[in-house]
Amino acid sequence: MAPERRTKTVGLIVGSLREHSFNRIIAAAIPELDTSLAFEWIPLADLPLYNEDVDHGDGPEPVRRFREAINRVDGVIIVSPEYNSGIPGVLKNALDWASTPAKTAALRGKPVGLVGATPGVKGTILSQQQIRQTLEAIQARVLPFHKMYVSQVGDKVDAERRTLTDDTTRKYLKRYVQQFILWIDQARALD
């Protein structure tokens, strides 16, 4: 009898609080690209600002839920904009909460992928560099060698800003997700 194949669960974190942000649109397209996976949205809106004075035990209730959500999934894909040539504050705050306590941090050893969309022409190169630097300090396992930047995203979604419509972007995003799923297995083998 063949062993039962467990469905992988991927957490989706969007580094923007805007309801109809371009990055939320991109993140919403990801589950459509691979129906063999389960996806879980991991929201950031309820997280308080990081404060070491209250970071003991499980932390504040929103932090406990956030950390538990990360622990439940096999890997996390962060889909984030670039604000002022850098990482959005809400995402940096979330990563700080996910980095403690250091020895059991939710993101420590967790496979992570990075995707970013912007209306500009350069993609989210600078913010992804900063996100990657923070994740490496946390000892998360960031997908190496593969990058997913969506530039001029306004031309790649519908007029209502609800759906990714560009087939080329979908193709590259699907390829990125496939590489990330392979990375989850490779990262597990490193344990």
Image: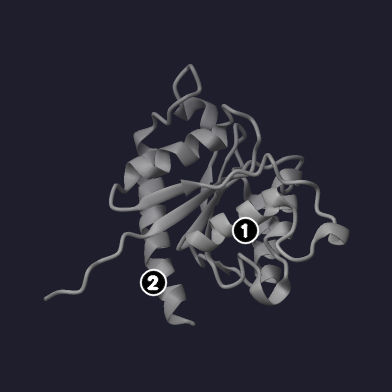
Q: How many tags in the picture?
A: 2
Q: Name the amino acid type tagged 1.
A: Arg
Residue at the outermost left position: 1
Please indicate, yes or no, whether residue 98 appears anywhere in the rendered image.
Answer: yes
- At 38% from the left edge and 62% from the top edge, which residue is drawn? 181
Residue 98 placement (x, y as % from top left): 67, 60
66 w.r.t. 167: above or below = below
The colour scheme of the drawn protein is one colour
The residue at the point 34 percent across, 35 percent down is 167
Label number found at residue 67: 1
Q: How far is mark 1 from mark 2, CA to CA?
A: 21 Å
Q: For this rendering, which residue is in front, 62 or 12?
A: 62
If you read the primary sequence from the N terminus, does the residue marked by circle 1 or circle 2 appear first? Answer: 1
Residue nearer the viewer, 64 or 134: 64
In the image, 147 versus 42, the foreground residue is 42
Disc 2 target residue = 185
Element class at badge 2: helix
Which amino acid does the dot numbered 2 rest on?
Answer: Asp
Q: Nearer the viewer, residue 13 or 152?
A: 13
Q: Which mark is residue 173?
A: none
Residue 191: x, y in percent? 49, 82
Q: Neighbour class for label 1 at 10 Å: few (<14), some, many (≥20)?
A: many
The image position of residue 154, as x and y in percent, is 53, 26
- Measuring 44% from the left and 21% from the top, which residue is drawn there? 158
* For discs 1 and 2, the disc positioned in front in the rendered view: 1
Residue 152 visible somewhere in the drawing: no
Asked if residue 128 lies left or right of residue 3, the reply is right
